[in-house]
Image: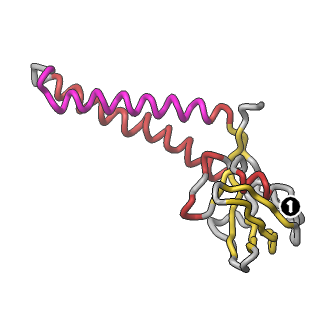
Amino acid sequence: MSDRDYISEAGFKKLTGEVEHLLTVERPRVVNQVAAAAAEGDRSENAEYIYGKKRLREIDKRVEFLSKRLDILEVVPQPKNTDRARLLSWVHVEDEDGTSKVFRVVGADETDAKRNWISWKSPVGRSLLGKAVDDEVKIKTPGGAVVYLVVEITNHSLSSPN
């Protein structure tokens, strides 16, 4: 199985921006705070020094994590057509009760349940990819099987359709 994952251009810029901010703003600020706290003397009982060192470790771990993620991410262009659901497509579905939902299929780094942005690796995301309008999608969930009908597929680069 490939370690590659996918992301939108905006998502990639957000992650690279976070790394840049951590390295050029946050880390230097914390280093200065730690240096000032260290200059005060006894470090064993210096809360500012101890907290600052902890914060530096957190920043370094986050930068390392993001750097590894960025190495395996592939930027996917916004799809131009709406014949089939693809990565970054908005897929409008209805369940058997007529309840509507709209999902955006995204890479794992951009999932956001509040915005209905679902990973292409999730059961729903995998099931929606490649589907066309009027296709039925059967998904096994912990609560039982769910059947959706694909009503519409749109490809907006904005945060939500319409």
Image-based side of 45 in relation to 145, left or right: left
Image-based side of 117 in relation to 59, left or right: right
Q: Quadrant of the C terminus?
A: bottom right
Amino acid type, label 1: Lys
Residue 74 spot, x, y in % from top left = 72, 40
User: Circle 1 is placed at which residue position?
Assistant: 131
Q: Quadrant of the N terminus?
A: top right
Of 11 and 139, the residue lying toward us: 139
Q: Is residue 150 above or below residue 126?
A: below
| Rendered image quadrant of residue 45 | top left
Residue 146 spot, x, y in % from top left = 73, 64
Q: Residues within 10 Å of mark 1 (few under 14, many from 20)?
A: some
Residue 139 spot, x, y in % from top left = 75, 58
Q: Is residue 114 above or below residue 6?
A: below
Residue 21 spot, x, y in % from top left = 45, 41
Residue 56 is covered by the magenta coloring = yes
Q: Is residue 8 visible?
A: no
Of 54 and 144, the residue lying toward us: 144
Question: Which secondary structure dominates the residues rendered in magenta?
Answer: helix
Report the magenta residues as a range: 44-69
Of 117 and 156, the residue lying toward us: 117
| Rendered image quadrant of residue 105 | bottom right
Circle 1 SS class: loop
Residue at coordinates 73% horizontally, 55% vertically from top-left? 140
